[in-house]
Amino acid sequence: MPAPVLNERGRRCLQELVRLEDVEVIFVADGATEGAPEGVCCLESGPAMPGVKRQLGLERSQGEVIALIDDDAYPHPDWLRYALAELDADPAVGAVSGPTLTPPDAPLLEELGGLVYASPLVSGPHRWRYATVAARDVDDAPTVNLVVRREDALAIGLDSAFQVGEDTVICERLIKRGRRIRYVPQAIVFHARRPLWRPHLRQLWKWSRHRGSFARRGGVNSLRPSYFAPSTLLVAVASGPVLRGSLRRLWSLGLVGYLGACAAAGADRDPRRWVRVSGAIVATHATYGVGFLLGFGGVRVSGQEG
């Protein structure tokens, strides 16, 4: 588990990890790690990117399977049981991931942020990251919930020079190695969300710019049409004022339909929750669309390799 410092969420994660059976828990932080639960191996990396920390943990570990998680998450008690069963069942599977669900005790604005991510209008075919759906092969699983065979982790390396998007790099390396990544709905990790609005949109801004940058480079798991969808939507909405006649009428109908779909997606008995979630879906599309275009257009992204 990598982190800059050990905070309250990190302590919760470590406490839940040490409760799991037959696990070696390694925590890699920038500096002091006082307050870590007994039985946790603590490493001090100095200021370093998450991938560098993961590589340090990999090199220190002894197990045949490497389970990656972040400090703002914690595992379901059966997390590793289901992940290991999938690895045992199919030697072609190099890594297993599962849903990252919003913690049941999350504050209201974090809960609503989780609802936005879990909406089909936001995550589309990648909704499996935020909800329990049918098992499937995937090509870009988050390292907050990724269980990798040690031999594959050593072969590809877990280090990278990215602050954001290092999970995409790891998964791309696995795919190029010819390994499958399997999503298992029972391999659950609970992951804290950024609250609406500013923290949620700031996180999306970082993610979208990196995704656009990866797509511009031709990354094998960043060229899905779904990643281009918010930017396409943004361009379509912006084109309205220059349209005339029947095209303008079609544009108006499309805009009304889109806003209606967002309103329906956020439907809730509580009007305040409804307005927040529906509005955040629109804001999420706009923020991601602009950020992806900037990254795809070559605008430099902080923490970028090369």
Image (tube, grey):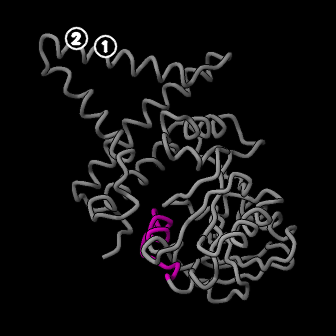
Image quarter (top left, top right, bottom left or bottom right) of the C terminus = bottom left
Q: Look at the picture and state if 278 lies above or below 218.
A: above
Mark 1, residues whose alpha carbon is within 10 Å: few (<14), some, or many (≥20)? few
> What are the residue bounds of the magenta stretch?
156-172
Residue at 17 percent across and 16 percent down: it is 247
> In the rendering, at what x and y percent does residue 288 appear?
38, 43
> In the rendering, at what x and y percent does residue 26 appear?
72, 79
Mark 2, residues whose alpha carbon is within 10 Å: few (<14), some, or many (≥20)? few
Left of 35 or right of it: where is 285? left
Give the tally of numbered discs.
Answer: 2
Q: Are marks 1 and 2 in contact (CB under 8 Å)?
A: yes
Amino acid at the residue labelled 1: Leu
Give the quadrant of residue 73: bottom right
Left of 276 or right of it: where is 242? left
> In the rendering, at what x and y percent does residue 160 appear?
45, 76
Residue at 67 percent across and 77 percent down: it is 66
Helix, strand or loop for disc 2: helix
Image quarter (top left, top right, bottom left or bottom right) of the N terminus = bottom right
Distance Cα–Cα, label 1 vs label 2:
6 Å
Check disc 1 and report the residue beneath it: 253
The reply to whether the magenta stretch includes residue 296 is no
Check disc 2 and report the residue beneath it: 249
Give the quadrant of residue 211: bottom left
Amino acid at the residue labelled 2: Arg
What number is the disc on residue 295?
Answer: none
Q: Look at the picture and state if 271 lies above or below 24.
A: above
Helix, strand or loop for disc 1: helix
